[in-house]
Image: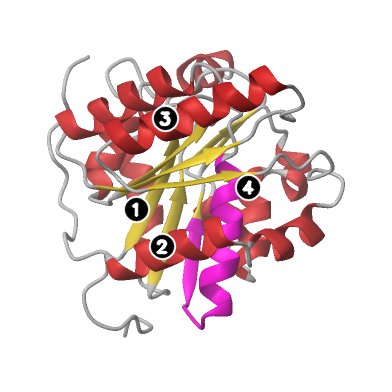
Amino acid sequence: MRRPKQLATDSSSRGVFITATDTGVGKTLVTSALVRCLTQRGIDVGVMKPIETGVLRSATARSDGARLRRAAGNHDPMAEVCPYVFRLPAAPLSAARAEGTTVRIATIIRAFHALRQKYAFMAVEGVGGVYAPLTSSLNVVDLIYQLKLPAIVVGHSGLGGINHALLTLQALRQRKIPILALVLNQRRPVRTKTARLQEQSTVTLLRQLSQVPVVGPIPYRPRVNQEWEKDLVRLARTVPITTLARLVLASVPGKLSRPD
């Protein structure tokens, strides 16, 4: 893919971009829990989900962007929190084409700047994995680079998690994007001895090979979608999320305060 020209951004921006090794690995859960944990510590957090697919504009109250906004306790316009919402549950490039439109990175950056002026810290959740195409020439890793944010990677703790995680970390390092942590999430219950051994192997090897802090695994939560708010409150207090919050706060120079 052709590399974009660097847009003018403020390199002192305080925030983090939560990306993933794949779709459906728990980005929104981890981001929402992190946001709730930070707000409970008195941090003024703004949230953003620049692109979301598989959602009707009429149903945005149940979208990932809306969940992030509720986690932060904010009331920002959804047009800023989630500038692009597409009906088709597919890669952003395909979803946008299905509606005869194009994702514009400049639009996302303008919305990001508008939100950043209101908050001490920004949590931005991506879509899919780092190479998910946003336009015919740009992908998610290009967006992270242009926003000048460090990254948190969410991956799954089961079989296959090692390869997916290491490839994602390599892609971020190639663009010289700082990586704060790798968060491992259980996508399904670990019920058998073999599954437990596979997870232990994944976690152990990633701690040895990833060269970044490895957080988790976050236990599988079978009713998370039905009991989202209750689960979020509990998860925000767990060791993996409080550890992640400490890593995030340690990455920010000085004390977080509301922008002027």
* Disc on res. 122: 2
How many C-alpha atoms fall within 10 Å of the one at disc 3: few (<14), some, or many (≥20)?
many
Which of labels 1 and 4 is toward the front? Answer: 4
How many C-alpha atoms fall within 10 Å of the one at disc 4: few (<14), some, or many (≥20)?
many
Which amino acid type corresponds to the residue marked 3 in the rendered image? Val
* Disc on res. 68: none
Q: Position of residue 3 (x, y in %)?
A: 16, 24
Q: Position of residue 80 (x, y in %)?
A: 50, 55
Q: Position of residue 202 (x, y in %)?
A: 47, 27
* Disc on res. 29: 4
In the rendered structure, are the residues bearing label 2 and label 4 in contact, judged by CB atoms less than 8 Å apart?
Answer: no
The number of numbered discs placed on residues in the rendered structure image is: 4
Disc 2 from disc 4: Cα separation: 16 Å
Q: Is residue 59 visible?
A: yes
Which amino acid type corresponds to the residue marked 2 in the rendered image? Met
Disc 3 from disc 4: Cα separation: 25 Å
160 or 151: nearer the eye? 160
Q: Earlier in the sequence, mark 1 or mark 4?
A: 4
Q: Is residue 5 left or right of residue 13?
A: left
Q: For the residue labelled by badge 4, is the local secondary structure a helix, a strand or a loop? A: helix
Q: Earlier in the sequence, mark 2 or mark 3?
A: 3
Disc 1 from disc 2: Cα separation: 14 Å
Residue 212 painted magenta: no
Which amino acid type corresponds to the residue marked 1 in the rendered image? Arg
| Residue at the spot of label 3 | 103
Q: Quadrant of residue 250?
A: bottom left
Residue shown at 23%/40% (left/top)?
Answer: 145
In the rendered structure, are the residues bearing label 3 and label 4 in contact, judged by CB atoms less than 8 Å apart?
Answer: no
Task: State the extent of the magenta-drawn residues as a range.
Answer: 27-47
In the rendered structure, are the residues bearing label 2 and label 3 in contact, judged by CB atoms less than 8 Å apart?
Answer: no
